[in-house]
Amino acid sequence: MLHSFKLQAAIRLPFLAALAIAELLDETAFLQTQPAVAHSRGGVNNSAVADSRGGVNNSAFPGAWVYREAGECNTVCDGILQIWENLSLGIAYVHIPKNAGTTIEAAVGFESVRHCTAKMFQDCKVQERNLKLFTSLRNPYDRAVSAFLMWAQMGFMNEVTSELEGFRTFLTELQKTPQEAGMYKDRDFADSSTPQVYSVYGVDEELLVHEYLRVKWLEEDWTLLQQAYPGLPNLPEPQNVADPHPPYCFYYEGNRDLANIVASYYAADFLFMNLSSDLSDSCKDYHQTEHEEGQ
């Protein structure tokens, strides 16, 4: 059955600018559905946050998103690194939007209002601060739905009659180039539309992040990370709030063209995570559940 609702207000800002502002207004809009598959790459404990699929794919260069030269240290990013230095954990978190970053930062007692990339931390001499970078990665199909739901919640949409119609509008805007959408590819801070690989590379395609958490198995991977970094606090207790939205696979069901947009736009993310871009692989459990409920 189609989940119907109305989303009020018209788009008053360019698409990507609207996403950036939405994130500043609502940093807690992390919607846990069925997120991610990611992998570890070295660090203090090479077995931490790893699974049988092996490490991330360092050949997955983000193409046009990659940085070519160093920049000045951003004061916001410098301040975030200072917070992590003061925690004396030996690590610092690269907050990729829609990847459980609010939950992770809550564990150590702060919340960033902007999302600094690893390259921005590189500009602030993170290597000289004895901090190893870690981040969390999420299935791009799931992350795209989460970004859409945040965008819809903040009212940056034309009025539509269903979630699926709104999601189609969202992805149509997403596949435009940043220039068409009113921003440029060489912007610094990451937002909900930015490919995840944009946040982990530095100048000339240097991979800067050492540890990767899988959002789908965040608690499990966090426990492993705590073993590598014993001073790391526990994650906050999850809130028992029912998600009013269907699982992310619902939004692609019968709409393979939407899945194709996500697979194309986030191709480097799928490659980086050694994750199949075939929607059927991501949604096997969802379709199994649907089959069992229909019997």
Image (tube, rainbow, N blue to C red):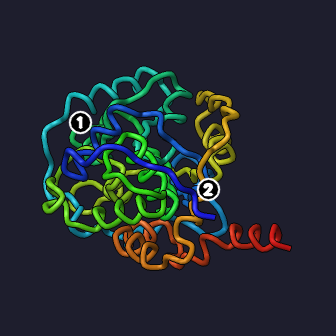
Q: Tag 2: Cα neighbours inside 10 Å, few (<14), some, or many (≥20)?
A: few
Indicate the position of residue 285 as horizontal and vertical percent values.
Answer: 71, 68
Indicate the position of residue 253 as horizontal and vertical percent values.
Answer: 57, 73
Could you say which is closer to the camera, residue 203 or residue 31?
A: 31
Q: CA distance from mark 1 to mark 2?
A: 41 Å
Could you say which is closer to the camera, residue 130 or residue 32?
A: 32
As helix, strand or loop, the secondary structure at mark 1 comes to loop
Q: Amino acid at mark 2?
A: Pro
Q: Name the mark on residue 33.
A: none
Q: Tag 1: Cα neighbours inside 10 Å, few (<14), some, or many (≥20)?
A: many
Q: State whether residue 59 is above or below residue 80.
A: below
Q: Which residue is mark 1?
A: 124
Q: Earlier in the sequence, mark 1 or mark 2?
A: 1
The quadrant of the image that shows the N terminus is bottom right
The reply to whether the C-beta atoms of the residues labelled 1 and 2 are less than 8 Å apart is no
Q: State whether residue 176 is above or below residue 103.
A: below
Could you say which is closer to the camera, residue 104 or residue 288?
A: 288
Q: Name the mark on residue 246.
A: 2
Indicate the position of residue 179 as horizontal and vertical percent values.
Answer: 13, 61
- Tell me if residue 152 can be seen: yes
As helix, strand or loop, the secondary structure at mark 2 comes to loop
- Tell me if residue 210 can be seen: no
Indicate the position of residue 123 as horizontal and vertical percent values.
Answer: 21, 41
Tell me what residue is drawn at x 21 percent, y 62 percent: 204
Q: Amino acid at mark 1?
A: Cys
Could you say which is closer to the camera, residue 209 or residue 7?
A: 7
Q: Nearer the viewer, mark 1 or mark 2?
A: 2
Quadrant housing residue 27: top left
| Marker count (numbered) | 2
Quadrant housing residue 67: bottom left
Tell me what residue is drawn at x 27 percent, y 54 percent: 202
Tell me what residue is drawn at x 65 percent, y 51 percent: 217
